[in-house]
Every structure is written in structure tokens, then in C-alpha cells.
Amino acid sequence: MSPNASRIQRILLRSGKSPYDAVPVEEALHRDVFASNAGNLIFSDATHKILETPHTTVVSNGIRTDGTPAGRINEEYDAFVVPLANAFRPSFEASLRRLTRLISQLKIPVVVVGIGAQAGLDYNPARLKPMEPAVREFVSAVLDRSASIGVRGEFTEKYLNGLGFKDVDVIGCPSLFMYGKELAVEKRAQELTADSRIAINGSHNAVRSQGLGRVITRTHARYPNLRFIGQNLSDARQLHWRDLSDPNGKVTGMPTHPDHPMYREDKVRVYIDPVTWIDDLRDFDFSFGSRIHGNIAALLAGTPANVLCSDSRTLELCRYFEIPHHTLDQLPEEIDPARLYEETDLGALTGNHHERFERFTSFLDRNGLDNTFTHGDGGAAYEERLRSLDFPGGVRPWIDTDPASLIARFGWLHTRVGELTADNAKLKKELDRVKAGTKAAAKTAAGKTTVVAPASRSVYRKARRVVGRPLRRALKGGRG
């Protein structure tokens, strides 16, 4: 759209929430605003900022696609922009099909940025074979509504080319373009010492089965100012509620687990908002670990980072952006962050960033999208608005019974009890209506019962699950 046009272009963005939504921690965890992984908000917030110009309005869709009225989207929006990460993976197939159904009903442009295929470090796509029909349908639907599809790296480009798709642009991830063509990252310390502030990150799988747990243990013993930054929803719930109901709760080697020493020492965080995540990392000397967006957050903060790649999704992005990295399968047994820091060369990352930025904005131009760095104020208004809002700090371990730490939790639980009570009352009224309307039929069906009791029990179980279990765990943890 021309920047001189008077009409405002309305863009619907697939994202868990708007960057301007300052959501309390309890509500954020209840709603899962980052779709199970806080890293998702880094690239969706970056996309929001990039697309917001004086001639565009960007609206978050809340990430859910079930029941989305495609007709209303066609009427109210001029484009649907879909930032994605490792969407071509078996566990995402059902979500990919739902997204395809929505896109197939749209008559407006649909632009996909940063999508990737997930395989091992050997780039073998064999595990993706069963979901090829879903991938073909999705990409076909997108390319029917856009000039090209933007992928995160070399592996995904080759994978889609092999499926017959040629309109594929390698653009990386929009997250690293949050500040435009400039990426100011430099080593502020000549070397790391025992006093250095170091951030470490990693997935449950990397900790459990790829050796990262041993790295965390050794680093924790040597560096008193180490902090682990988790990203999963289950991580945040373990910190805030001591909730171990998720299967990830079995990974005791994860610092977000209440039994881990870093948890007990308050050396763990999970961030609900990228702005607080990035701000906190500005004071660190170094970041490393297997989480790609955990380390991108550090780079955006100007802090050197080194990614320990565990699969194709991290490896191809590191290769494209020339982010310093190692592969977990070839990491020395006694690796020390001081050595990683010494080996971290940021020259290619920062030196070639401008060229990659121009490639990214050319992709946006080709697909009819303006960007704030070419057609706006470079994100100044966006940043000013963010700074005017009060976002919650990083979620911390619940390790005390201080009244201030309990008020928000208990207040939210009290509200949930009220909501459930109201819902229960509505259900009872509906059940009474159904019962009255089917009374005659119930009498003729000998030995059969109505649905009143099971439905009532379901409400009771829901109340226990949402309120009772977290409260009991919280109180138990608070006494520890």
C-alpha cells in the first residue's frame, strides 16, 4: 500500500496478544498468551512493531483459529500476516490444518513470515513425510494469496523446493529486525570471570537427554551470578504456582523445577512480555543455551550470545543470521561459558545485518506491506507507548510466604471461584430447563438417568482443577 494513500490499511496479525496488552501474571498464565512458549511473543511483537506505520493499524487475533469468522475478517481487514516458527513439525499438524482452513476462506492477502521445518541437525526431512499433504495444502493456500512465503533458513527453503514450491524467500525471523537495520551487539567485558552475570536457557529435552543438564549444573557451581531463563508455559506455572501437573514437571534437572537449587536461590525467571525480558538482559555479560529466541532476546539487548543448537530449526536460523553457535552433539564435555564467550565472534552477525534487513523489507514490499523503518518513524511511537505501560516483571520462583507475594495470587483465585460459581449457576438453570423439557421422555426410558449428575460433577471437577490444586501446591510450597 502506498504510504501516500489516505486510507488506513488494517492488518490482522496472528499473535497471542498485542504488545500493548499489559496482562497480570495470573491472567497471562491462565490464558496462555504466548501459546506455550514465550519466544513466540518476541517474533510476533517484532512483526507488530515493523508493520505499524501512520497508514496501518495492526490488530492481534489472539492466535486461536477455531471458529474465527472468515467473513468478518474479509470485511474488516486488508491483510492477514502470520509470523510462525517451526510450524512444519508433526506435533503442529492439527494446528496447521486449522490455519489452512481459515486461510482458504480468506479473500484478502495472507503473508507468512519466518516459517520453518523441524528436523534433526542432519537436516533429514524423513520425519516430515507423513505430514506432507498438510504442508502442501497450507503453502498452496498461502501462495494463492501472496507473492511468496518467507522462511527462516536454508533447510526450510530446500524442503519446500523439494515439494515443488519455488516462490520461497529466505528471510530469517522478524525478531532480529525489531530495531531495523541496526544491531548493536558487542562484548563489554574482555573475559568472563566468576563475578560475571550470565544468562543460560534451554528446553526440557535438551536438559533431559542432550547433556544440557550437566552444563547447567557445572555453570551454576562456578558462576554465582548465573540466571536461568525459561520459556515454556509449564516453566512459568512451576515458578508462580509450583504446579507440576504438566509432563515437564518430571524433569527435575530443569532449574524451573521447585526441587532444583537454582529455583530455591531465586535464580530463575520466565517473562510474559518481551520488553521486560530484553530490558533485564541488558545488564548481563553473556547469554548461552539451546533456546534460539532466548538468545535472540539477549542480542536485541546488546548482550553477546552463543546458541547451542539441538535441531534444524535453531541451526538454520543461526546459519542465516551468522549467530555464534555450536551444536549440542559436538559440545566438549567440560564446556565453560568463559570459553564460549572467548570464541564468540559477533563480526558477521552485525556486519551483514544491514543486507539481511534489506532482503526482509524487500519481501514485505513484494507482498504489499509497508514497514515502520521505510514508511514510518522507525518505531519511535511504538517504543514510546511501550514505555508508558506498566508490564509485570519476570515471573520468579515462589519461595516465601511474604503477604505481598500472596495477595495477587489469592486475589486471582478468589476471582476464579466467583467466575466458576456464576458459571455453575448458569449451568444449573440450563440443566433444569432441559430436565423439565425431557421429563416425559425420561419416565419412559426405564433405568436411564438424566445428565444432571454428570454435568454437576464436571463443574465440581473443573473448580477443583482450576482453584483447588494450584492453591494446595502454592500453600505447600510457601511453607518450604
Image (tube, rainbow, N blue to C red):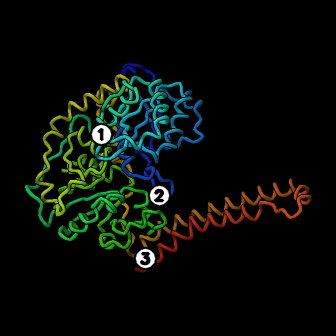
Where is residue 320? Give x, y as percent: 24, 37
Nearer to me, 323 or 468? 323
In this orientation, does residue 16 appear? no
Say left or right for 109 vs 171: right
Nearer to me, 190 or 116? 116
Nearer the N terminus, badge 3 or badge 1? 1
Nearer the N terminus, badge 2 or badge 1? 2
For disc 3, the marked residue is 478
Residue 178's tag is: 1
**Up-down: is 359 above or below 117?**
above
In this orientation, does residue 130 appear? yes
Q: CA distance from mark 2 to mark 1?
A: 25 Å
Where is residue 422? Give x, y as percent: 67, 60
For disc 2, the marked residue is 29
Q: Judge the density around disc 2: few (<14), some (14-19), many (≥20) Cα neighbours within 10 Å.
A: many
**Up-down: is 135 above or below 337?**
above
**Outermost residue toward the left?**
190
Q: Residue at x 34, y 49 (%)?
A: 274
Say left or right for 415 vs 430: left
Q: CA distance from mark 3 to mark 1?
A: 39 Å
Q: Residue at x 78, y 58 (%)?
A: 431
Nearer the N terminus, badge 3 or badge 2? 2
Q: Say which amino acid is labelled 2.
A: Leu
Q: Say which amino acid is labelled 3.
A: Gly
